[in-house]
Amino acid sequence: MSAVPASAAPINGRVTGLPIPRYVSLGAQRANMRVGPGTDYMVKWVYLSPGLPLEIFAEYGNWRKVRDQDGTVGWMYHGLLSGRRTGAIAPWKEGYVPMRDHASSIAPVAARLGTGLVVRLRSCSGTWCRVTGKDGGWSGYVRQQNIWGVYPGEVLP
């Protein structure tokens, strides 16, 4: 799981001026991850999962160096990415993670979410995140520490 150390402030990317590192999601139906920043570089991986959370940790022109939830690293063209925040439910665990009716460990369990499931992040308090399914058909609260795609203590309005 990636995290921004509490003592290290993010830097701003030279190209976009946005914080590095930062989380984004895959915005395209199909996207090539390449071994270098350009179409002349070999395709390392082909993604077919729109909404997949990715972490940007470098920029070079129109290319972003990204990492996925499995730790795979490569370069993607910026137009394939989206600022919409998503997360993967505890891909480092096996089994299920409880989704609660409200942001409390004593709240009723609304569902058990399979690890690796991609969810939309609607808001995060620094401790809990309100999540919904990709289609928006269900919602609830998951402890922020159980989501890859949001930093520890990060607040999303």
Image: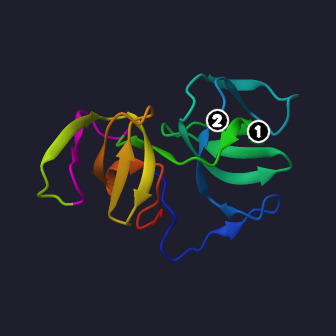
Q: Quadrant of residue 119?
A: top left
Q: Name the residue carrying label 2.
A: 27
**Residue in the foreground of this view, choosing between 136 and 83:** 136
**Residues shaded magenta:** 91-103
Residue 52 counted in the magenta span: no
Q: Quadrant of residue 136?
A: top left
Residue at the spot x=40%, y=60% of the render?
A: 124
Q: Name the residue carrying label 1.
A: 79
Report helix, strand or loop for mark 2: loop
**Residue in the foreground of this view, choosing between 117 and 67:** 117
Q: Quadrant of residue 19?
A: bottom right
**Residue in the foreground of this view, choosing between 69 and 104:** 104
Residue 65 % position (x, y): 70, 45
Most common SS among magenta residues: loop
Residue 112 % position (x, y): 21, 36
Residue 77 % position (x, y): 77, 38
Identified by mark 2, the residue type is: Gly
Identified by mark 1, the residue type is: Gly
Query: Are the residues flagged by discs 2 and 1 in contact, CB closer than 8 Å?
Result: yes
